[in-house]
Structure formats: C-alpha cells, structure tokens
Amino acid sequence: MLEKTTRINYLFDFYQSLLTPKQRNYMELYYLEDYSLGEISENFDVSRQAVYDNIRRTEAMLEEYENKLHLYEKFDKRQKIFQQMENKAENNKEVENWLQQLQELE
C-alpha cells in the first residue's frame, strides 16, 4: 500500500496541473493530508461513494498520463543514475559539484 501511495503522490506531483480543481482537492486531501473518504465527503457535502469513485478515476487518469508521457519513469531513472554517480564520485569534489548542479535543475 505504501508503494502505491508513493507512486500516486509522485504522479500527482507531475500531472496535477492536468486535473480539475475538484480532482486536485480530493487527491490532496486523501493522499497528502491523509483525510478519510468520510471526512472528504463531509467537507464537500457529497457521498462517500462519490469521493471514492472520483479518487479511483483520478488515479486511473494519472496512470494514463504516465503511460503516455513517462515523466515519473524518467525521473526515477535519473534519480537512480544520480545515486550511482554520487557513489562513484566520492572524494572527487568537481564531480560532486556537477552532480549537485544537475539535481538543482530538477
């Protein structure tokens, strides 16, 4: 479950601008603020089922965006490469500096 939550949080970070305000609100409350479905339904005066359905549809949309654009996949690969480079670059200040500059660009 934690792995799914982490993935959805990353996908949300990358693709939230493609979502409607309502979708963003529900996802922020559910995934970032750790609200329950019941709490969200009370805040928006809708049924718990409506919140659940909206969140599931939004998760599917985020996965579709990722399948088409691969932003998270590329980010993850870059992070792994950076980690490997950092491990090899120990004691080489010039290379460490370059890696730091690259990470600041993200």
Image (cartoon, rainbow, N blue to C red):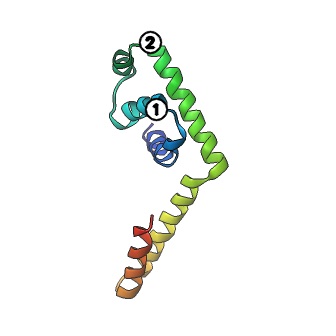
The residue positioned 48% from the left and 30% from the top of the image is: 23
Q: For residue 92, say whether it is visible.
A: no
Q: Residue furthest right?
A: 68
Up-down: is 49 above or below 100? above
In the rendering, at what x and y percent does residue 70 appear? 61, 53
> In terms of image quadrants, where is residue 99?
bottom left
**Residue ID for mark 1:** 21
The residue positioned 43% from the left and 29% from the top of the image is: 26
Up-down: is 52 above or below 101? above
Assess disc 2: are there few (<14), some (14-19) or many (≥20) residues with their C-alpha within 10 Å of its C-alpha.
some
Assess disc 1: are there few (<14), some (14-19) or many (≥20) residues with their C-alpha within 10 Å of its C-alpha.
few
Q: Image quadrant for the C terminus?
A: bottom left
Tell me the kind of residue under disc 2.
Answer: Ser
Q: Is mark 1 on a helix, strand or loop?
A: helix
**Residue ID for mark 2:** 47
- Between the residue at mark 2 and the residue at mark 1, the CA separation in whole angstroms equals 18 Å
The residue positioned 42% from the left and 84% from the top of the image is: 95
The residue positioned 41% from the left and 31% from the top of the image is: 25
Up-down: is 26 above or below 63? above
Q: Nearer the viewer, residue 69 or 56?
A: 69
Q: Image quadrant for the N terminus?
A: top left
Q: Residue 8 shows which numbered tag?
A: none
The mark closer to the camera, 2 or 1, is: 1
Q: What element carries label 2?
A: loop
Tell me the kind of residue under disc 1.
Answer: Pro
**Side of 71 relative to 44 (left or right):** right
Decide which of tag 2 and tag 1 comes sooner along the chain. Answer: 1
In the rendering, at what x and y percent does residue 92 appear? 37, 87
